[in-house]
């Protein structure tokens, strides 16, 4: 029973990390550049949700606001929309003016944005750990010995919907096909009339919406501070390296592996040992498959 | 003949070095014009400049009654220019079907109609529609790229050495397909090595020499 308990918690955490990693990969694929502010955007998403909670509670009638569950439910879509808007601004300010520069310039520009976010939020909210409200109230239910919090299930359900939605968009729609084509050969995509710059802006909006969802979901159980971004960035980077640079499926698989170590392995050993083992596994994967588990969907004919 | 593409005194090049010098040429509606010339005379540069992948220094480019010289690449493509680039450039990680679908600016029945035209033209692609494009042979990739250009429902296709590096038998298939495309009334500007292999398909052959057109 304990194992099942850990499995549910691990899946929920992995799903949330998966949202973080997917947002990172979307911008990576669209621009070819590493967005080093992504962890800070996840953190910022948590604080956006906290600020929106205040705003929603003051707008909503008391009977709804007091219920908790309603605030949480409204919080998810509003956070997604606000973060998507911030994604468009982020693209316009930190990427578009530099799009013809080498990727390293964009990398530095995103580092700057990350620092502005963490310092700006520190100035506004202070450095103390904060948490977001749960999505469906704070309850839990038990099945025999198995105790599952509503929040774990909410994380899992929300992540499944968002990840599934993203998969559908990328694989089944013309917009998704165009995003993939533009990622593989932007010059050729333009030559077919595809508005590549617009698709890049869409990628930023989607990436930050996912970051917002992740921030909202994670900050309930794990708290956030303005300096949480670094650790989240590292997890996204790790997940993508394990799963395969640029692969959406790989990003989710890598995120799941990290969560498996943080929850499953840690429960058998200890947190530091689990983290050490995770990096050993990373090394093993890099030796055996440098392109990552799902890497190299594109090959070359001999 | 109604003019489709009118280029007047076009000068373009890389980093201040003019490769095309005051080049003037026309392509009429439904015409198939071949540009021949040896390596380095500016055939690819001309095609890049026409599509806008390379900024012009001076001169005008009119396409279907519009001055397109200052339009970005994607707008020229949307007006009806399509590219079959040198070196093929399929979208390697997309399937054959996706490579074609992604090029279509239309949805539903009209996209399916364009797909039917392409699969009729290149039956070999039909059986490979689910394969990733990088898995195709060179000749199949060339067919896919020509098909992809057709999917945009172009008025003019710019083809940069479409038979380069293909086995003679494959090359013949590609040329036959280009002929069919020309016969349905799509304008074609095709660059080739020293002589045109397209034979009677071509309405005119122009010789490019050191950045301008020379008498044949």
Image (spheres, coloured by chain):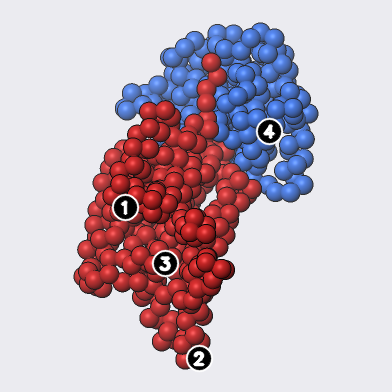
Chain colours: A red, B blue
Where residue B131 appears, as percent x and y from the top left, is 65, 30
Q: Do the dots labelled 2 and 1 sit on one chain?
A: yes
Q: Is residue B157 left or right of residue A93?
A: right
Which label was assigned to residue A271? 1
Q: Chain of mark 4?
A: B
| Gap between marks 3 and 4 measured at Cα | 39 Å
Q: Is residue B112 left or right of residue B205?
A: right
Which label was assigned to residue B130? 4
Question: Considering the image in quadrants, where does the N terminus of chain B appear?
Answer: top right
* Lower position in the chain sequence, tag 2 or tag 3: 2
Q: Is residue B44 above or below residue A281?
A: above
Q: Residues within 10 Å of mark 3 (few under 14, many from 20)?
A: many
**Mark 3 sits on what residue?**
A216
Q: Is residue B199 left or right of residue A206?
A: right
Q: Do the dots labelled 4 and 1 sit on one chain?
A: no
Q: Chain of mark 1?
A: A
């Amino acid at each position: 029973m304990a194992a099942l308990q850990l499995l549910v918690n691990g899946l929920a955490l992995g799903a949330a990390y998966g949202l973080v990693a997917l947002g990172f990969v979307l911008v990576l694929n669209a621009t070819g550049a590493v967005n080093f502010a992504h962890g800070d955007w996840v953190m910022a998403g948590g604080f956006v949700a906290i600020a929106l909670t205040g705003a929603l509670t003051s707008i909503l009638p008391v009977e709804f606001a007091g219920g908790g569950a309603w605030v949480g439910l409204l919080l998810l879509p509003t956070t997604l929309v606000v973060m998507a808007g911030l994604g468009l601004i982020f693209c316009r300010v930190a990427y578009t003016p530099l799009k013809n520069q080498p990727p390293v310039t964009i990398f530095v520009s995103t580092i700057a944005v990350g620092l502005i976010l963490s310092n700006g939020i520190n100035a506004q909210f202070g450095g103390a750990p904060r948490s977001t409200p749960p999505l469906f109230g704070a309850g839990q239910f038990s099945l025999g010995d198995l105790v599952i919090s509503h929040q774990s299930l909410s994380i899992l359900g929300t992540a499944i919907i968002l990840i599934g939605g993203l998969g559908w968009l990328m694989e089944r729609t013309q917009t998704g096909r165009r995003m993939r084509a533009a990622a593989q050969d932007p010059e050729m995509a333009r030559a077919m009339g595809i508005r590549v710059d617009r698709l890049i802006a869409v990628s930023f909006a989607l990436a930050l919406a996912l970051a917002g969802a992740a921030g909202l979901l994670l900050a309930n159980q794990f708290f956030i501070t303005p300096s949480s971004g670094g650790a989240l960035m590292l997890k996204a980077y790790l997940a993508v390296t394990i799963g395969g640079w640029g692969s959406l499926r790989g990003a989710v698989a890598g995120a799941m592996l990290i969560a498996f170590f943080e929850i499953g392995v840690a429960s058998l050993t200890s947190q530091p040992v689990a983290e050490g083992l995770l990096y050993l596994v990373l090394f093993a994967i890099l030796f055996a498959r440098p392109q990552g588990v799902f890497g190299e969907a594109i090959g070359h004919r001999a | 003949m109604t003019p489709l593409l009118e280029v007047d005194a076009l000068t373009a090049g890389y980093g201040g070095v003019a490769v095309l010098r005051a080049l003037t040429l026309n392509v009429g509606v439904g015409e198939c014009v071949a540009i021949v010339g040896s390596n380095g005379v500016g055939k690819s540069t001309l095609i890049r400049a026409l599509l806008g992948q390379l900024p012009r220094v001076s001169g005008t480019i009119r396409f279907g009654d519009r001055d397109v010289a200052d339009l970005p690449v994607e707008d020229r493509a949307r007006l009806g220019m399509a590219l079959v680039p040198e070196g093929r450039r399929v979208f390697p990680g997309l399937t054959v079907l996706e490579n074609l679908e992604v090029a279509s600016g239309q949805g539903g029945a009209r996209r399916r109609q364009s797909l039917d035209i392409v699969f009729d033209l290149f039956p070999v692609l039909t059986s490979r529609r689910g394969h990733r494009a990088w898995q195709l042979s060179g000749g199949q990739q060339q067919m896919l790229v020509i098909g992809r250009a057709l999917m945009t429902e172009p008025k003019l296709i710019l083809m940069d050495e479409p038979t380069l590096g293909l086995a003679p038998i494959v090359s013949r298939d590609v040329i036959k397909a280009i002929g069919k495309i020309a016969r349905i009334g799509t304008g074609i500007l095709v660059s080739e090595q020293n002589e045109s292999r397209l034979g009677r398909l071509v309405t005119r052959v122009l010789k490019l020499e050191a950045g301008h057109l020379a008498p044949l």
